[in-house]
Image: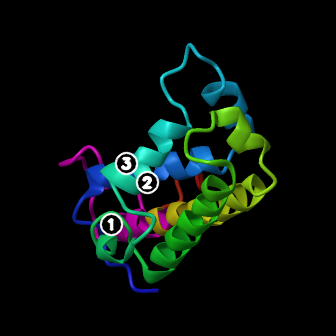
Amino acid sequence: MIDHGVALPYYRLHVLPAVVALASPTWQREVWLDPGQFEDLKYTVHVLFDDFCDADNPWPWLGQCLRSEEEVELMAGLGTAYNAVQDSIGSAACDKVYLDSPGWFAVVAAAARLAQVMVSNDHSALSKLHDAGYRWPLGAEPVASATDDQHGES
């Protein structure tokens, strides 16, 4: 896998939680169907299709908020799955109609696979930064290496 990094990490901080929300039917029912909550399907769709990515055409987002070609392909698949549901029930349908749609399982499955890949890619990128000596908070002293046996004298 080639990790293109991301030029717009702030965008990714919006995209990943939106993908995770689409991957979680429990979250969808507990949050999106609660009128007291801010987040709903419309918000999530705007994040992924309008504001921080374009699930209909994610290729320009490679290296921007998507790290790999696999992420781009999976985002395109998520866009296709969502559009199929929207085409079958209409864009004006309420969230509950989307969640109850027979095609919604394909949206959840596509989002789950994309979420898994995105989290794995972020973990890999973070691990590479750590291996290169970057520590948080910036300027912190390096932590003990795995070869240092801190419990050897106990």
Quadrant of the rendered image containing residue 6: bottom left
- Vertical position of residue 123 compared to residue 40: above or below: below
Which circle marks residue 55 in the picture? none
Amino acid at circle 2:
Leu
Residue 84 point in image, percent of width and height: 64, 63
User: Horizontal and vertical percent for residue 116?
Assistant: 61, 63
**Residue labelled with disc 2:** 48
Instruction: Identify the amino acid type marked 3.
Output: Leu
Q: Left of 130 or right of it: where is 70? A: right
- The mark that comes first in sequence, 3 or 2, is 3
Spatial CA span between label 1 and label 3: 18 Å
Q: Which mark's residue is nearer the viewer, 3 or 2?
A: 2
Q: Residue furthest top?
A: 36
Mark in front: 1 vs 3: 3
Q: Would you say the magenta stretch is mainly helix, strand or loop? A: loop
Residue bearing the label numbered 1: 129
Number of numbered callouts drawn: 3
The boundaries of the magenta stretch are 123-146
Asked if one can make out residue 117 in the rendered structure from this viewpoint, the answer is no
The residue at 73%/53% (across/down) is 104
In the rendered image, residue 56, in percent from the top left (x then y), is placed at 44, 67
